[in-house]
Amino acid sequence: MAIDRREFMRLAGLGGVVFASGLRQALAATSAGSDGDFYFVQLSDAHWGFEGPPNPDAKGTLKKAVAAVNALAEPPDFIVFTGDLTHTTDDPKVRRQRLSQFRDIVSELKVKTVHFMPGEHDASLDNGEAFQEFFGRTHYTFDHKGVHFIALDNVSDPRASLGDAQLKWLADDLARQPKNANIVVLTHRPLFDLYPQWDWATKDGAKAIDLLMPYANVTVFYGHIHQEHHKMTGHINHHAAKSLMFPLPVAGSQPQRNPVPWDPAAPYRGLGFRNVEAETKEAKYEITELPVQKA
């Protein structure tokens, strides 16, 4: 029986897909010469290696996410991990051990292509050296069925900056794109100043936004803040993903950025995933947030 895209995405949210935090996106490439529909999965902030409160299932949520993605009725075209694959450590040996363990776990994903990005927990203490040993470049571009994806690195520099060299690289890449190109930017920290007091900003993110502003169809997906958040800078939409490890409070809602406590009566509260349908011809994104449910 044939089903339309909306019905498929509704069905894909059932059957135990409860830990795929972040973005699950169906891109309907309806413009002339397009290559057809596709969707991808975004997971963020797995923090492998974290232990203790507030997540008593710290060693289980990433593995559940992998199983959930593998259980999708229709596999995604690809997967992106938008940073903080592992939890920070001062020990370079432990850092590499955690990156290795993370890589082993996600190698079980039944998807041909997986794109990885670092978070500050993975990269800020060694400028991304260990991350690159396991996963390659920290910033890059790729194209898929009419959409140009740009992965930016605002974490390897401990000052939370993109840096002049990467900004020039971004400018050179954008100069090769038509002004009506469909562009999706993937990053870890927000590019705008969400709450700098809690490190929820990129020091020179405004420069990246200025470079993106002349392009009509730009959407940014990021992680880092462990909660759903939506923001407009001009015509550019920014959407934050939830975490696979623990939720964080709303910016400024409490004195310190402490994780939201685990609630035994509502386990996995604050962890979740979203469906995002996009019409690339009109550059429209329809987001549906779905809760994590107790297995």
Image (cartoon, rainbow, N blue to C red):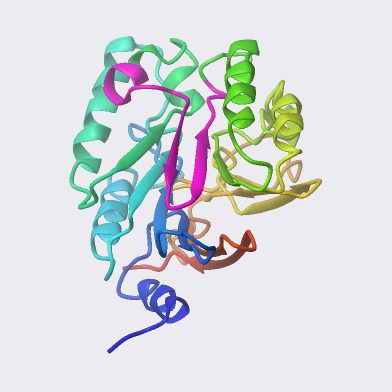
Tell which residue pokes out farthest to the bottom in this image.
Answer: 1
Most foreground residue, 147 or 273:
147
Q: Is residue 145 magenta?
A: yes
Residue at 22% in and 49% down: 109
Query: Is residue 160 in sight in this rendering?
Result: no
Residue at 33% in and 58% down: 76
Dividing the picture into quadrants, the one containing residue 95 is: top left
- Number of residue marks: 0
Query: Against 119, is 144 above or below?
Result: below
Quadrant placement of the N terminus: bottom left
> Residue 91 at what x, y percent from top left?
34, 11
Q: Is residue 183 magenta?
A: no
Dividing the picture into quadrants, the one containing residue 122 is: top left
Tell which residue pokes out farthest to the right in this image.
Answer: 234
> Residue 177 at what x, y percent from top left?
60, 37
Residue at 45% in and 40% down: 45
Most foreground residue, 139 or 31:
31
Quadrant placement of the C terminus: bottom left
The residue range painted magenta reads 131-155
> Residue 200 at what x, y percent from top left?
67, 33
**Left-right relation of 62 to 234:** left
Query: Is residue 277 in sight in this rendering?
Result: yes
**Left-right relation of 68 to 10:** left
Tell which residue pokes out farthest to the front in this image.
Answer: 33
> Residue 199 at what x, y percent from top left?
66, 28
